[in-house]
Image (cartoon, rainbow, N blue to C red):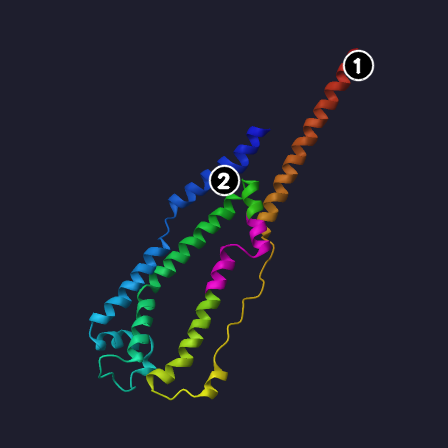
Amino acid sequence: MLGCWIVLTLILPTLATSAINAAIPVARGTDLTLAQREVIHGAWDRPKEETFDAFFVNHPEWRDTPPVTGRFHWKWYHAFHQVGDEAVAPQVAEYRASLAARERWSERSGWVLPTVATQVLLHRLADTDLAAQLAYQDSIGAFHRRIRYFYYPYVFEERPFTAADFDRLPEFAPRGFGGSIALGSLIALALAALALLALGLRRARRVDVNQASRAGAE
């Protein structure tokens, strides 16, 4: 029994996780961060027109704003930070897609590994799984976009920022609880429980038959 417990709770889940990670490689988050920072820091040495041309691709509404003629302007600073984020956006999308693929295969492994199914079920119920993490990141990203579009008119159009504008600042709304029941994992656990129950009843019936046979022989 101890050997079965070790195999089911430690060895098989570890092997399944290792196989999934090997089959679905995921880029390291630090590499994405470094790539983004390289684009940002490199902007200090590139012509400002190059930065603004890249920025205006996704933000054409600011193309006709006054140009930057001096050595520094906040609109240039904010523009090359946004360009840095957009430069690694495809890699970030691939990173998130790979994580989601790993999560799906982990859930599938729960169909044959009850301990994995239990873990998936509890994480989904507690709203602490990958979907919850990505949803929280998306809520932060949405808040960041609201802040950017709030300040852009002041920065790009050089509009004065008054004390009354502080009352209009966007506020972050925390993401609500999104826990739910992982139906697939629950079904897998129910099937495993029924299979074990059927096996136990069959063994118990066999024991009863053997005992009855011995009693008849005596």
Residue 192, percent from left and from top = 61, 40
Distance (Cα) linking label 1 and label 2? 47 Å
- Which SS class for mark 1? helix
* Near-viewer residue (18 or 35): 35
Q: Are there few (<14), some (14-19), or many (20+) residues within 10 Å of tag 1?
A: few
Residue 187 shows up from this direction: yes
Q: Residue at x 43, y 88 (%)?
A: 162
In magenta segment, residue 215? no
Please report the bounds of the magenta region as a residue range: 120-137
Compared to residue 145, the image places residue 36 above or below, namely above
Disc 1 target residue: 216
* Of pointers 1 and 2, the one earlier in the residue sequence: 2
- The amino acid beneath tag 1 is Gly
In magenta segment, residue 130? yes
- The amino acid beneath tag 2 is Pro
Identify the disc placed on residue 21.
Answer: none
